[in-house]
Amino acid sequence: MLNLKQTSTFHLKDLLSGIVVFLVALPLCLGIALASGAPIMAGIIAGIVGGILVGALSGSHISVAGPAAGLSAVILMQLEQLGGNYAAFLLSVIFAGLLQLLFGIFKLGFFANFVPNNVILGLLAAIGVILILSQLPYLFGIADFSWRQLPGLSMAQIDPIAAGIGVLSVLVILAWDVSPLKKLLLPSALIAVLLAAVLNVVLSSYLGLSIQPQNLIQLPNVLANPSGMLMLPDWSYLAEPLIYSGAITLAVVASLETLLNLEAADKLDPYKRTSPPNRELWAQGVGNMASGFIGGMPLTSVIVRSSVNANAGARSKCSSITHGVLLLFAVLFLVPLMNLIPLSALAAVLILTGFKLVHPKLFKQMLSKGWKQFLPFMITLLAILFTDLLSGILIGLLVSAGFILYGNLHKGVRVYKEKHLHGVVTRIELPSQVTFLNRSSLITALSHVHKHEKLIIDATHCHSIDPDIYDVIQEYQNQTAVQRKVDLKLIGFKQHYADLDDAVLDIDIATADLQRNLSPQQVLNILQEGNQRFVDNDRLQRDIYRQIRVTADEGQHPIAAVLGCMDSRAPTEMIFDVGIGDLFSLRIAGNVAGQKVLGSLEFACQAKGAKVIVVLGHTDCGAVSSACQLRLNNQNIEDVTGMPHIQYVLGPLMQSVNSVHRLMQPLELSPAFLDQVTRMNVLYNIAYILQHSTVLQQLHDEAKIAIVGAIYDVKTGKVQFLDE
């Protein structure tokens, strides 16, 4: 049993998982700062703030915040626009944090649900491409070189020692991740970075092969120069518009990434706790404001560190706080050791991270989903690469919205061709929300209505109707329908437009004239077609309230009478898809005909004009099964206890049971035996009706009525007429 109290207090596993997350976060903080064009120390500061401050404020127990690879492209582009002035960029970080704080306060954490998945994946893929391109110079030991200058790269600019260590780091990470060593808690990125630092020391100390200083990490010694650790914002840039556009970009992208990672982290939580998204937004906002004030990078919830945290056994947010404290310890006391790490090793980590984001499988996966998913994905990716992150996201959203709008131009409005009692009717059903997007599909549907047709425009399920749509309908009603002599009826509009009265529908009501003019064969056709609609789950829409009123005022004129079983799985009106006033329904266990049933059927046909009598048996009938079991056990009806009147049901059934038993000689209660008895029972009851009712016999002989048998299959819903 889960003890939530234990998961909210510090536990030894939180300390251990905090150490593991620290080992993963240290190279990532350094590498992401490098990839972003920010000072190396800025990555460590963001990691400390994300671990300690955000970790304390967050409502998540598993999520870990810090500098994210997903923001590196944003930072890189904004620094280029600001001429590399990182102090000015810190203002964007502060205002982005303020926006995130407001997002959380005003409970806007739901907005991530409205960003299409193809745009999100396009964003991540673009970040992967930028990560790879931006880190290639560092991989080959060219620290002061922009990825946009890669076409002009020459071999003379490459630092061979740094390049060799960088390529080796790539191979180490790849080999570690596919070897049994992967099961150890030590991450491959940390192993590669440590190996690169050791190799750098060995080469420079024993072989005299030194990496150029600019290709090594250059963290300031905080203990020797405390002021060198922090960088303050440049407030003179407050009037610069780029600061605010950059803040909006950072806030949107960081919030989106945080919310997506938060959801993923909750899925990793072994205790399946749910993190409040709005609290996470304002916690991240406070963290970004604090990070910006002291020179740190922007931060988000990071899925890599969060997944490591969960896998290492973290129980509470104490693990995240522990990792932040360890980062602070490292920057205070381990700087000389960290300055031995080649930048090419960090570049190797980030290039492989970028490759995971832009893996070829992603393109194959998106293409398999169709062009409507693939094109917005590709356009978002390319737009980000050729413009900037926010513009690329907006372009991707517009393209994705365009596909959605185009798809809705011919959807939403449903057209049904329905065969009612009074003939074929075209029914155009409007959706719950009718907007200008439905205009095209409505006009198309109306254009396909032929002359002299009966048309219903059904708005009974609408919650709102745009005036544009109403104008289209009014124009059609007043002009086109009149010219083409279309019998148009509007229903469901009065609740939206008080000056419009809904039409009265009589298409489903069996009137005296309709009943009189129908032949028995036509009635059978109506019942067969209704059953097919029932099987297809395509039952007609009916104005039940209207049927109740009309039949109450004008009386009943049913077209058929059905003698069915009382089995709850055989509702007669539903089976034949008829409305109120269409059927006389007699239901009795075993669908057996007796004197009272004969009286009812004579009333239905002679007095009320019904044209068809259907004796309806059904599969898996309890009464039939009981009668068959009695015969197989050589028992009498009198042996049945607890039901003194059951003889009136089982007695008539035994004639059918005995007849089939003589023919089949069954040894046990088989489905075939039951089916044959069910059929025989239907036929015996038809014979009983004709033999004992001279009225019905005469109507039948004069072809004024038809008496047919049928079997209803309780598994499929299909009615099989025995005359078939």
Image: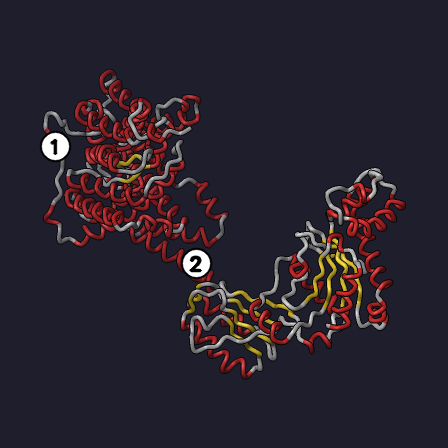
Q: Is residue 245 above or below residue 337?
A: below
Q: Is residue 196 above or below residue 676?
A: above
Dot label at residue 228: 1
* Residue at the extreme bottom: 483
How many marks do you count on the picture?
2
- Relative to residue 547, is residue 492 drawn left or right? left
Task: Name the residue rendered at 17%, 43% in the picture.
Answer: 90
Task: Name the residue rendered at 65%, 74% in the picture.
Answer: 555
Q: Amino acid at mark 2?
A: Phe
* Residue at the extreme top: 206
Q: Residue 721 at what x, y percent from top left?
A: 77, 59
Could you say whether the residue bearing mark 2 is in a helix, strand or loop?
A: helix
Dot label at residue 403: 2
Image quadrant where residue 258 sits = top left
Q: Amino acid at mark 1?
A: Gly
- Relative to residue 106, is residue 171 drawn left or right? right
